[in-house]
Image (spheres, rainbow, N blue to C red):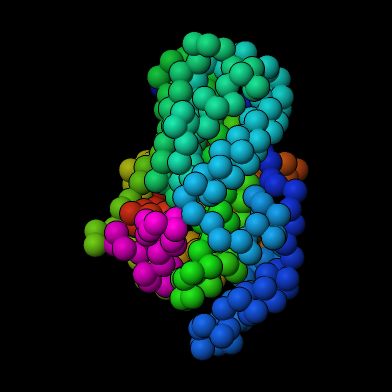
């Protein structure tokens, strides 16, 4: 079977930087009077493993009342700009130009735009009029792996076609100052904004190819993670502790996923995981039987950018592929997202 090869990766982040200590100060002034248990939750900011994050909008924007209209205006503008920057980066790193792209897969769950983002930026990016478009909504944090896998399947189904995959998420635009609850405070401590892109094709120089992909959705877990839709905008849902769920249930699901991918843990030379938070990273290391600290690039990306949802795992993959000490062995990308779903993609060296 002809495999899709990863020709290049790109990334982009907004210019508005928020240090984590500033985020804590702001959250304390904003929530403590309305949420009596705030000080018991405050350590989540310091223990998150995050040094700073990038925000879609300037800080004063978040102090103003927002609704669907203002959030959507911001989403279309900032998501479009980040899409272009990440796509141009990936295309250039692949040795191509925008006119070479035959198909675009766009993953985003933090805003709504019709026409979709890749159509809004079509002319400015320089895509051809006949480019095929595949916008995908609702994958959440799993979108980096599931979206890359979808783009790889489409590239493999049409040998020679160049498929651009872009994941862009503006998590902070969904901040709800009217919600003084645990889930909203955790989200305020964790999430940032960014975009990542990749070009895939069955032909061309590449370090890795996407060999196979699979997903596992746990029954009865639809309320674990997702969006609550309200007149003011989207509100984050964390119905259960994700780290404890990973500790309890990841390993048996992973074994089933590995079987479908026709591989074993012994054959995986490197895991590339979505760093949902420092506790999630530790739970992943325990479940994967890795020494503490093994997922070093995951921790580094989390520290520099926070949890950007779907693009985050692509930031990790870019750092892994740039590592001169990378072993010439299979890599397994993993991400958890709404559903509650484990998404996996197996990457193999091309030489």
Residue 172 in the image: state x and y as whole percent: 58, 56
Query: Which is nearer the eye, 176 or 157?
Result: 176
Q: Which residue is drawn at 61% across and 76% down?
A: 30
Q: In the rendered structure, which segment of residues is drawn in magenta? A: 221-243
Query: Which is nearer the eye, 247 or 199?
Result: 199
Q: Is residue 311 above or below residue 33?
A: above
Q: In this view, does 126 lie above or below 265?
A: above
Q: In which quarter of the image is the C terminus?
A: top right
Q: Which residue is drawn at 44% across and 58% down?
A: 232
Q: As drawn, is 6 to the left or to the right of 250? A: right
Residue 145 in the image: state x and y as whole percent: 48, 43
Q: Residue at x 65, y 31 (%)?
A: 84
Q: Quadrant of residue 81?
A: top right
Q: Quadrant of residue 12?
A: top right
Q: Quadrant of the N terminus?
A: top left
Q: Is residue 100 above or below residue 104?
A: above
* 228 within the magenta span: yes
Residue 25 in the image: state x and y as whole percent: 70, 76
Q: Which residue lies furthest to the left in this view?
A: 220
């Amino acid at each position: 079977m002809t495999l899709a090869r990863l020709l290049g990766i790109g990334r982009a982040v907004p210019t508005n930087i928020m240090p984590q200590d500033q985020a804590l100060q702001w959250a304390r002034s904003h929530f403590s009077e309305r949420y009596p248990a705030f000080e018991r939750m405050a350590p989540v900011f310091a223990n998150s493993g995050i040094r700073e994050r990038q925000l879609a909008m300037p800080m004063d924007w978040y102090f103003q009342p927002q609704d669907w209209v203002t959030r959507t205006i911001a989403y279309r503008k900032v998501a479009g700009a980040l899409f272009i920057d990440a796509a141009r980066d990936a295309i250039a790193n692949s040795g191509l130009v925008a006119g070479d792209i035959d198909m675009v897969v766009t993953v985003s769950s933090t805003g709504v735009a019709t026409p979709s983002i890749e159509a809004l930026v079509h002319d400015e990016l320089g895509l051809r009029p006949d480019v095929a478009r595949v916008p995908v909504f609702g994958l959440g944090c799993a979108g980096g792996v599931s979206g890359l896998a979808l783009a790889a399947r489409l590239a493999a189904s049409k040998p020679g076609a160049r498929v651009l995959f872009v994941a862009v998420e503006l998590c902070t635009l969904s901040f709800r100052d009217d919600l003084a609850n645990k889930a909203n405070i955790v989200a305020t401590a964790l999430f940032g904004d960014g975009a990542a892109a990749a070009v895939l094709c069955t032909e061309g120089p590449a370090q890795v190819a996407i060999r196979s992909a699979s997903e596992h959705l746990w029954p009865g877990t639809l309320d674990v993670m997702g969006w609550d839709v309200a007149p003011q905008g989207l509100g984050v849902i964390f119905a259960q502790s994700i780290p404890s769920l990973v500790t309890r249930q990841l390993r048996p699901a992973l074994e089933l996923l590995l079987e479908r991918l026709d591989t074993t843990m012994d054959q995986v030379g490197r895991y590339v995981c979505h760093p949902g938070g420092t506790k999630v990273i530790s739970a992943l290391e325990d479940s994967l039987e890795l020494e503490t600290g093994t997922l070093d690039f995951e921790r580094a990306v989390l520290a520099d950018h926070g949890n950007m949802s779907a693009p985050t795992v692509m930031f990790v993959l870019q750092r892994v592929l740039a590592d001169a000490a990378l072993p010439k062995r299979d890599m397994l990308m993993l991400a958890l997202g709404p559903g509650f779903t484990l998404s996996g993609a197996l990457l193999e060296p091309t030489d």
